[in-house]
Amino acid sequence: MNHDLKIYLSNILKESITGISSVHGGDISNTYKIETSSNSYFLKLNSSIHAVKMFQAEAYGLQVIRETNTIKTPKVYAHDSFQNNTFLLMEFIESKSPSSSDYKNLGNQLAQLHQCTSDNFGLDQDNFIGSLPQNNKPNTTWVDFYTTERLQPQIELAKEKQLLSKNECPSVQSIKDFLEPLFSNIKPALLHGDLWSGNYLISKDNVPYLIDPAIYFGHHEVDIAMTKLFGGFDATFYETYASHFKTDENTSARIEIYQLYYLLVHLNLFGSSYHGSVSGLLKKYF
């Protein structure tokens, strides 16, 4: 990190920076722990052309979740551009390995977040899933929203990138026809939107935090589907969460259909190693 940026951040914090160390924080941005004599901060730096919008969307998502008073997110201090970099400066959370009681808290608090509802599916602004744009145009039905704002844009992108062939891609109408009976009586729930194991923390004082959100109002099972995609969370988390929401005979099919969105995103971001998983689910359901 250059000296000018360090001075710029010191002025924002109104504190002298005493230490800067690189930390692991994801694939998209460079991440650092910033230390002053009295506090620690987490800094993301990114020089891509989408970084301003990405960090604005991330800051907004953290704020929306925070304001529900259901589950904590790190406090955001600033997001700005300086020279060739865009940055997001937030509270540093000292984390620890979760215990069974931590997973119980996470399950309860995520369920409380999912009880925050809206008149529509979607959001008042678009955001990102990873580094890909995520459309959130509000819709009154979950079938229409999930088909046109989630599956279809990723299917089209995969086709453009020649990661899916034309005959592997179902039509919008065939998707909607299949989903209609599975998606009845679904109420909008505020979602984290990208809830894998790297996007929550348990603080040293046993408090769950959500990070890197891709929020919108959707079906609460979407977040659960993502938690199960790459290995799953602790059984205590699922048992606790399940005490708040009923499942039905279509839950397992919906979980796979929601995982299809994330697998399409991974196909478009990381390439053909995800093709088998995507094409298998497309064949199975559509």
Image (cartoon, helix red, strand yellow):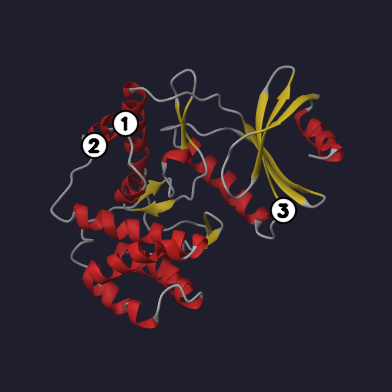
Secondary element at image label 2: loop
Query: Which of the 4 image quadrants contains residue 112?
Result: top left
The amino acid on which the numbered mark 1 sits, given as a three-letter code, is: Asn
Residue named by callout 2: 244
> Label 3 crowding class (10 Å Cα cut-off): few <14, some 14-19, many 20+?
some
Residue 33 seen in render: yes
- The answer to whether the residue labelled 2 contacts the one labelled 1, judged by CB atoms less than 8 Å apart, is yes
> Label 2 crowding class (10 Å Cα cut-off): few <14, some 14-19, many 20+?
some
Secondary element at image label 1: helix
Query: Which of the 4 image quadrants contains residue 14?
Result: top right
First in residue order: circle 2 vs circle 1: 1
Residue named by callout 1: 108
- Relative to the observer, which residue lies in front, 245 or 153? 153
The amino acid on which the numbered mark 3 sits, given as a three-letter code, is: Ser
Residue 134 seen in render: no
What mark, if any, has residue 47 been given in the picture? 3
The amino acid on which the numbered mark 2 sits, given as a three-letter code, is: His
First in residue order: circle 3 vs circle 2: 3
For marks 3 and 2, give the CA distance. Answer: 42 Å
Q: Which residue is drawn at 66% across and 54% down?
A: 51
Q: Which residue is drawn at 69% across and 60% down?
A: 49
Place of residue 261 in the rendered image (x, y in percent of width and height, measured from the top left):
38, 61
Q: Residue at x 43, y 62 (%)?
A: 273
